[in-house]
Amino acid sequence: MPASPPLVLIADGHADCGETLALALELSGWQVCAARRGEEALVWLRQATPRAVLVDARLPEAGGLHIARVLRANPRFDATQVLLTGTWFTPHEKTQAQACGVDGIWMKPFDISALLRRLEQPRVLRTLRQQGN
């Protein structure tokens, strides 16, 4: 029996961007779930443990930093990559993202090939990062 495709949540309030990214990931073998608002993403995350979450920093209702904090507070998501997306970031937002345990910041528009390579890499578990390894 073939293994099920890896699961990714795309949380983006801009339909065109989210749909384009979802199509590119599906064509590359990923199973995609999409949310257009922060609360919708949080509800979805109560039901599943994706391998990766791509979340817009300025997602309506609950932004990317809030969602990153929620994920990093729950050990169930220790192996889940959290990638913050957006068209621009202030230096303060970048510092906050690092403090929240975000695994990367991705500027729109995406280089899909580079993003796919990143998603294929396993996440360094939080316990190892806390130990400085």
Image (cartoon, rainbow, N blue to C red):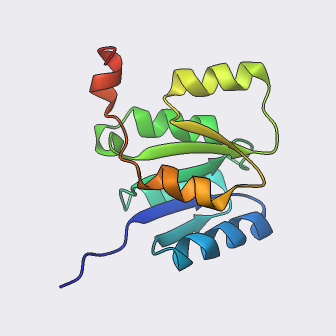
Q: Is residue 68 left or right of residue 5?
A: right
Residue that protrudes farthest toward the top in the picture: 132
Q: Position of residue 8 (x, y in %)?
A: 47, 62
Quadrant location, the C terminus = top left
Q: In this view, does 111 lie to the left or right of 98?
A: right
Q: Is residue 69 above or below residue 128?
A: below
Residue placed at 33% from the left, 29% from the top? 126
Q: Is residue 40 visible?
A: no
Q: Nearer the viewer, residue 122 or 62?
A: 122
Residue placed at 69% from the left, 56% from the top? 111
Residue placed at 60% from the left, 53% from the top? 114
Occupied quadrant, residue 63: top right
Q: Position of residue 59 (x, y in %)?
A: 71, 49
Q: Is residue 25 left or right of residue 95?
A: left
Q: In this view, does 24 lie to the left or right of 92?
A: left
Count of marks overlaid on the render: 0
Residue placed at 35% from the left, 37% from the top? 74
Quadrant location, the N terminus = bottom left
Residue that protrudes farthest toward the left in the picture: 1
Q: Where is residue 52 in the image (x, y as percent from the top left)?
A: 46, 53
Q: Can residue 58 be seen in this view?
A: yes
Q: Position of residue 68 (x, y in %)?
A: 52, 37
Q: In this view, does 130 lie above or below 41?
A: above
Q: In this view, does 22 lie above or below 48?
A: below
Occupied quadrant, residue 94: top right
Occupied quadrant, residue 73: top left
Q: Which of 89 and 43 is in front in this view?
A: 89
